[in-house]
Image (tube, grey):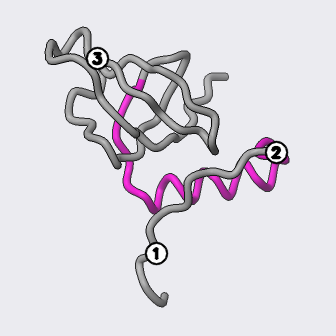
Amino acid sequence: MCLAVPGKLLSVQGEDPLERSGRVSFGGVIKEVSLACAPEARPGDFVLVHVGVAIGVIDAEEAEETFRYLRAMGELEGLDPEPAPSQGPP
């Protein structure tokens, strides 16, 4: 089974779509990832990352839902995921 983990894209380096990379925060742990498969990603976006490659951009609501699942599984202990922006009262 494969798992892609959401993270918040902090910055982007490079102009060539195949060589673009970005700094992504996973609950305060920052990793450099390839953006070749997600050329539309911009700083502030949430991206799904699998083995060091951002495979797509997701909205903040989907990122928060994934964080809830990971918290429930105990996979976020010691990490503080980037909170999704509040959408206002439900």
Closer to the observer: label 2 or label 3? 2
Query: Depth check: 71 or 2 in front?
Result: 71
- Which residue is located at x 55 percent, y 16 percent? 51
Label 2 to label 1: alpha-carbon separation = 23 Å
Q: Which residue is mark 3?
A: 36
Name the amino acid type tagged 1.
Ser
- Which residue is located at x 52 percent, y 41 percent? 6
Among the 4 quarters of the image, the one containing residue 14: top left
Give the side of residue 32 with respect to residue 15, left or right. Answer: right
Name the amino acid type tagged 2.
Gly
N-term mark: 2 or 3:
3
Query: Depth check: 23 or 71 in front?
Result: 23
Helix, strand or loop status at disc 2: loop
N-term mark: 3 or 1:
3
Q: Is residue 58 above or below residue 12?
A: below
Q: Which residue is mark 1?
A: 86
- Which residue is located at x 59 percent, y 39 percent? 26
Label 2 to label 3: alpha-carbon separation = 30 Å
Give the side of residue 68 with respect to residue 51, left or right. Answer: right
Q: Is residue 35 above or below residue 86?
A: above
What percent of the width, then of the height, locates residue 15? 15, 18
What percent of the width, then of the height, locates residue 70? 72, 48
Which label number is shown at residue 78?
2
Q: Is residue 64 magenta?
A: yes
Q: Is residue 35 magenta?
A: no
Packing grade of label 3 (10 A; few <14, some 14-19, many >=20) is: some
Q: Which residues are magenta?
A: 54-76
Give the side of residue 22 with respect to residue 13, left or right. Answer: right
Name the amino acid type tagged 3.
Ala
Q: Is residue 39 above or below residue 76?
A: above
